Every structure is written in structure tokens, then in C-alpha cells.
Image (tube, grey):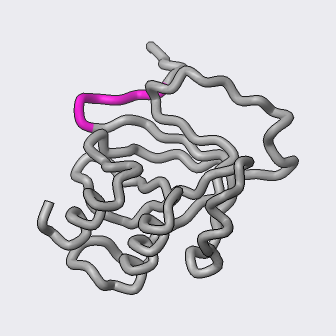
Amino acid sequence: MKMRNGFVSNSSSSSFVILGEEVELSDLDVNDLNNNLYSYIADPQIDGGEGTMYALIDTPEMLELMKRAQNHEFENGYGDMHVYRAWYYAYDWSDETIDRDKLPKKFKMFLGTAQQGSPFDDANEFEQMLDGSY
């Protein structure tokens, strides 16, 4: 039997890992986005075919967009999205190492399959995907 120790991917998806904790989107405001210790990542529950569309919430525009999606303002996406305060995140092509000293004593690991076409940090593209005009 062959075993693979790394991530598994194909042409349309890639593995995704988040080290952090799940938080409520309604608890976030613009001031939270200015923290250098962690990032916020949303899973707006858009069906990407072979993976999830993840969003990096790093601008006021993306934060507002994700809140609108959670309030069912779009054709695509669902209100039960997951939002993570991430101390570390990576796709399978990332070659970074984790500095354990920067991680909190308690955190969870979230694994997923990310759609490679996901507009991870582009609020305009994400809005097009959510309203069905992409």
C-alpha cells in the first residue's frame, strides 16, 4: 500500500488548512481586520464543484460582502457560513513553516478542499459569484 504524507490535489481543487478558531461573523467589525497576529477567513458555502470557495476577510468591503451573504442577500451562498480567526492558513502549494511561538496554546485545525478558481481576496469577484453574474 502506498501512502502520501502531503496534501492531495487535482487540477481544479487544492487542499486547505486553517489553524485557529471558529468565530461569529456578526461579532467582527473593521477594527478586527487591523490585527497583525491573525487573519479572518470565511467559507460562504458556495458550491465550487470540486471544492469550497474561501474568502479572506481583510478589507471593509469583504467584511460587508460576507455579512450580506450571511443575510441571504444573494442567489448563491448560504446563511450558515463558517468564519475562522486564523493564526495560520495555507493552500497545498504553500511552502511556509509554522512558527509555534506565534500560535496560541489552544487552537483547532480545520481542513478543506479549496476550489482553485476561488477569488480568495477579491471582493468584486466574490460578489459576482454570490449574485450569479460571474
The residue sitting at 58% across, 57% down in the picture is 40
User: Total marks drawn?
Assistant: 0
Magenta residue check for 38: no
Residue sitting nearer the eye, 44 or 31: 31
In the visual, does 43 lie left or right of 21? left
Residue sitting nearer the eye, 63 or 16: 63
Magenta residue check for 10: yes
Q: Which residues are drawn in magenta?
A: 7-12
Q: In which quarter of the image is residue 69?
A: bottom left
The residue sitting at 50% across, 67% down in the picture is 60
The residue sitting at 43% across, 71% down in the picture is 66
Q: Is residue 29 above or below residue 2?
A: below
Query: Residue 34: x and y, percent?
Result: 66, 58
Query: Residue 101: x and y, percent?
Result: 86, 34
Q: In which quarter of the image is the N terminus?
A: top left
The residue sitting at 23% across, 29% down in the picture is 11
In the visual, does 22 lie left or right of 82? right
Q: What secondary structure is the stretch in magenta mostly built from?
A: loop
Q: Is residue 1 above or below residue 37?
A: above
Query: Residue 94: x and y, percent?
Result: 50, 26
Q: Quadrant of the C terminus?
A: bottom left
In the image, farthest residue toward the left: 133
Residue sitting nearer the eye, 134 or 116: 134
Q: Quadrant of residue 28?
A: bottom right
In the visual, does 51 lie left or right of 98? left
In the visual, does 104 lie left or right of 111? right
Query: Residue 118: x and y, percent?
Result: 31, 48
Residue 131 seen: yes
Q: In this view, does 40 lie above or below 87?
A: below
Residue 108 seen: no
